[in-house]
């Protein structure tokens, strides 16, 4: 039987990109899916697409950077179905910019989603999950959480923050039956690049060594890893090799990123 059958799966950022693809696959495997994101029209569309293909879906339009809105959405989910069996933190945004091109407001927005959004949502469900001593928390981050490259300072910092949150939480939960999985992807051809203009052209040329994934491919790798209770899912395969290289040869990796990364025009 599918690992996802009759499970409650809550997906932040479930109206687009990797989150939406996770929702499609989870619903197809028999899960009840809850979607959280801000844009109600996109949520409605995603949810009705899931139901048209026979899935079960509900959504709550929520700005996850607002603790009050998170508390309201979490309360509704808890009353409807209890704490999720699987929580996937996929909501995130942030344009790739040099730090001096990033306003304090933009920096705060980037810290707020994905990082604070994942922290607020996880925190709100943690009590009920611990009480039940059951659940699976999944955080998404980027290869940027394991290395840096030029021209995306605040973006990279927040993806490291996601990794830090994930690692710390995993240790906090070690004595419980709650599982955690960190999903790490290189480039995924989602609407992210349209939502965060000026970013795609700053992808380091070294990315050409790694196949770009479609959102459904990223979601499929993630869901397989969740079912197998893997602590880390990194896709595609070549990214796993590069993460290994970054750990063993950090100076070499830094040089590659510097040499193939964005070059700033002289002022
Ligand atoms: N695409 C890639 O190449 C790639 C690779 C590795 C990792 N990632 C990471 O994966 C995450 C998802 O990326 P994606 O490609 O799926 O992007 P996407 O297609 O732009 O989707 C982002 C989702 O997050 C939601 N969201 C953004 N800010 C939010 C907020 N304040 N409150 C609630 N929801 C919010 C968006 O909906 P609303 O705008 O309606 O709120 C949308 O549903 C990002 O953190 C990204 O860094 C992406």
Image (tube, rainbow, N blue to C red):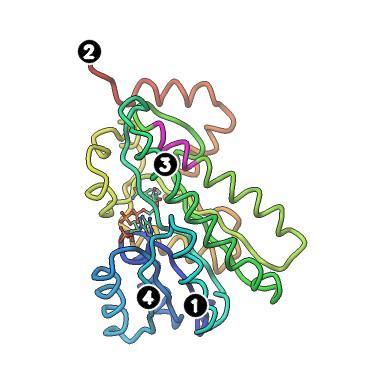
Look at the magenta stretch and give its main secondary structure: helix
Quadrant location, ligand no. 1:
bottom left
Q: Mark 4 or mark 2: which comes first in sequence?
A: 4
Query: In this picture, is 83 found above or below 155?
Result: below
Instruction: Confirm if mark 1 falls within 8 A of ligand 1.
Output: no
Q: Mark 1 or mark 2: which comes first in sequence?
A: 1
Which of pointers 3 and 4 indicates the residue nearer the eye? 3
Q: Mark 3 or mark 4: which comes first in sequence?
A: 4
The residue drawn where x is 28% and y is 54% is 190
The residue drawn where x is 41% and y is 41% is 108
Q: What is the CA distance from the residue labelled 3 to the residue labelled 1? A: 27 Å
> To which residue does mark 3 refer?
108
Residue extent of the magenta highlight: 153-159
The residue drawn where x is 69% and y is 70% is 130
Which of pointers 3 and 2 indicates the residue nearer the eye? 3
Q: What is the CA distance from the residue labelled 1 to the residue labelled 2? A: 51 Å
Q: Mark 3 or mark 2: which comes first in sequence?
A: 3
Q: What is the CA distance from the residue labelled 3 to the residue labelled 4? A: 26 Å
> To which residue does mark 4 refer?
59
> To which residue does mark 2 refer?
267
> Is disc 4 placed on a helix, strand or loop?
strand
Query: In this picture, is 226 found above or below 155?
Result: below
Q: Residue furthest top?
A: 266
> Is disc 3 placed on a helix, strand or loop?
helix
């Amino acid at each position: 039987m599918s690992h996802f059958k009759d499970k409650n799966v809550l997906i932040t950022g479930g109206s687009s990109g990797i989150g939406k693809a996770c929702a499609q696959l989870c619903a197809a495997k028999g899960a009840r899916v809850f979607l959280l994101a801000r844009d109600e029209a996109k949520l409605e569309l995603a949810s009705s697409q899931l139901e048209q293909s026979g899935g079960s879906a509900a959504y709550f339009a929520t700005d996850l950077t607002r603790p009050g809105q998170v508390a309201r959405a979490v309360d509704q989910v808890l009353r409807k179905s209890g704490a999720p069996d699987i929580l996937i933190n996929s909501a995130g945004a942030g344009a790739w910019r040099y730090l001096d091109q990033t306003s304090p407001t933009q920096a705060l927005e980037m810290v707020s989603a994905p990082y604070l959004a994942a922290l607020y949502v996880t925190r709100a469900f943690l009590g009920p999950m611990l009480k039940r001593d059951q659940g699976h928390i999944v955080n998404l981050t980027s290869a940027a959480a394991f290395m840096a490259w030029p021209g995306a300072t605040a973006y990279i910092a927040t993806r490291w923050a996601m990794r830090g949150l994930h690692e710390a939480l995993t240790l906090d939960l070690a004595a419980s039956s709650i599982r955690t999985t960190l999903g790490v992807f290189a480039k995924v051809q989602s609407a992210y690049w349209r939502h965060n203009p000026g970013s795609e052209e700053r992808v380091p040329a070294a990315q050409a060594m790694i196949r770009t994934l479609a959102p459904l491919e990223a979601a499929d790798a993630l869901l397989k890893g969740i079912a197998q209770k893997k602590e880390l899912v990194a896709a595609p395969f070549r990214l796993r090799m590069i993460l290994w290289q970054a750990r063993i040869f950090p100076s070499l990796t830094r040089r590659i990123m510097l040499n193939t990364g964005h070059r700033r025009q002289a002022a």
